[in-house]
Amino acid sequence: MRERINHTSPKLLRVRQPAAVRHPETGELVVPTNDRPWTADDPLVRAYPWLFGTDTEIHTEQTAPPVESVRVETARQRPGTRRTEW
């Protein structure tokens, strides 16, 4: 029986934001950058999955709708004055 070979390419990941993290194998502090592709089986990706994402995930996060402000009550009395209405 022949073994099936998977010809799909590994999912390439990028760093979401700069962060100094401790390398899980060496214990050294490192700052992962996007100067090389990252794969899911990389020790840093396995140890810090929140730090990496696909292009689609990162693009979705960067294009999320902005948060809208809410109306804030305006003070009608001078500071230190008690309110009379409830």
Image: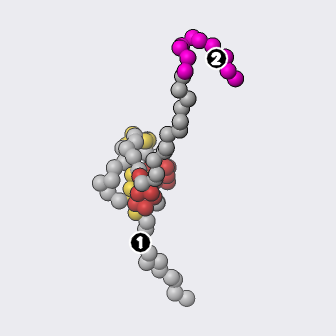
> Looking at the image, which residue is at 45% across and 57% down?
60
Q: Is residue 82 magenta?
A: yes
Q: Residue under circle 2?
A: 83
Amino acid type at circle 2 is Arg
Answer above or below: position of 39 versus 33: below
Residue lying furthest top: 80
Q: Secondary structure at mark 2?
A: loop
Position of the N terminus, as image quadrant, is bottom right
User: Crowding at label 1, few (<14), some or many (≥20) Cα neighbours within 10 Å?
Assistant: few
Amino acid type at circle 1 is Ser
Magenta segment, which residues?
Answer: 76-86
Q: Position of residue 53 (x, y in %)?
A: 44, 56
Q: Secondary structure at mark 1?
A: loop
Q: Position of residue 27 (x, y in %)?
A: 43, 41
> Looking at the image, which residue is at 43% across and 68% down?
10
Residue 11 in view of the camera: yes
